[in-house]
Image (cartoon, rainbow, N blue to C red):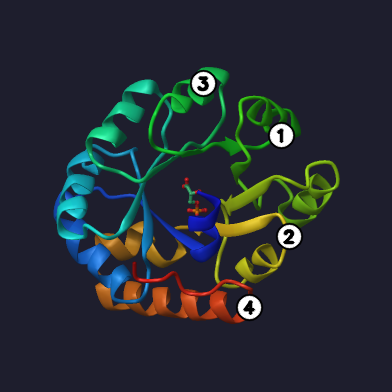
């Protein structure tokens, strides 16, 4: 999992209200260079949208986001997702996900949640909601006692602030919706989503040690 995230510094976090938007939206992301996406399971359209995306983009790395229950873990497995992301970290969810073939990136917002995750064998976490939790200053403080832990920082990330996150030794990636904002999807503004995505990836590769993922 860490290898995957190190090679993909940005994960677009997609929330879809209309199944029909799934393929054109993802086409605009893939043509901009993204090889990884997260689709949140927080809308009625999410499951059928992921099904369409899986069929149309067999090589794309697809994460199921907003995983909060064992039922959603099973749904992500059935849909052929590659990984899962949760907003928080309950012991039941962390233990349940350990039985899944899909890796889970658990969301954490406290040091105690990191410790619970470490006890259960997790080392990669989603730091959420990053900006509200103190952002880079908090990540720097966490790095002191937890040098082995790596984060995908998510929540309030933008083109303007992602660089400071990606430069942290304990941040391998950021997640965000700024290039796939719900208002852009509602307008079906695929050209703007494509342009924002290209700018985001070019900026990330320039700012950081990250390199584009191989096509294999
Ligand atoms: C989410 O789960 O909504 C993601 O963290 C996206 O956050 P953002 O909309 O602030 O980028």
Q: Which residue is mark 1?
A: 110
Q: Residue furthest top?
A: 92
Q: Secondary structure at mark 4?
A: helix
Quadrant holding the C terminus: bottom left
Q: For mark 1, does the 10 Å Cα neighbourhood hold few (<14), some (14 to 19), or many (20 or more) residues?
A: some
**Relative to residue 155, is residue 42 depicted above or below?**
above
Nearer to me, 190 or 61: 61
Q: Residue at x 57, y 59 (%)?
A: 173
Q: Earlier in the sequence, mark 4 or mark 3?
A: 3
Q: Secondary structure at mark 2?
A: loop
Question: Of helix, strand and loop, which one carries label 1?
Answer: loop
Q: Which residue has dot 2 on it?
A: 169
For marks 2 and 1 on the same chain, the one whose residue lies earlier in the sequence: 1
Characterize the local packing of mark 2: few (<14), some (14-19) or many (20 or more) Cα atoms within 10 angstroms. some
Q: Secondary structure at mark 3?
A: helix
Residue at mark 4? 207
Q: CA distance from mark 2 to mark 1?
A: 19 Å
Q: Earlier in the sequence, mark 4 or mark 1?
A: 1
Farthest residue toward the front?
216
Q: Which residue is mark 3?
A: 95
The CA span between labels 2 and 4 is 13 Å
Residue at left offset 45%, top offset 21%: 96
Q: CA distance from mark 4 to mark 1?
A: 28 Å
């Amino acid at each position: 999992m860490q290898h995957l995230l190190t090679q993909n510094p940005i994960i677009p976090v997609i929330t879809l209200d209309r199944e029909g938007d799934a393929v054109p939206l993802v086409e605009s992301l893939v043509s901009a260079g993204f090889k990884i996406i997260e689709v949140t399971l927080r809308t009625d359209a999410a499951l059928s949208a992921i099904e369409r995306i899986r069929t149309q983009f067999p090589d794309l790395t697809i994460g199921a986001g907003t995983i909060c229950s064992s039922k959603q873990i099973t749904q992500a497995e059935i849909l052929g997702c590659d990984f899962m992301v949760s907003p928080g970290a309950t012991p039941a969810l962390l233990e349940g996900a350990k039985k899944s073939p899909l890796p889970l990136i658990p969301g954490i917002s406290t040091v105690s949640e990191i410790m619970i995750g470490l006890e259960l064998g997790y080392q990669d976490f989603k730091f959420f909601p990053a900006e509200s939790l103190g952002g880079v200053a908090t990540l720097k403080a966490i790095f002191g006692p937890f040098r082995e832990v790596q984060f995908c920082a998510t929540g309030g990330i933008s083109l303007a602030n992602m660089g400071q996150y990606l430069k942290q030794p304990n941040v391998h990636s950021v997640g965000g919706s700024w290039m796939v904002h719900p208002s852009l999807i509602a307008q079906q503004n695929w050209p703007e989503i494509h342009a924002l995505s290209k700018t985001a990836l070019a900026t990330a590769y320039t700012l950081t040690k990250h390199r584009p993922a191989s096509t294999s």
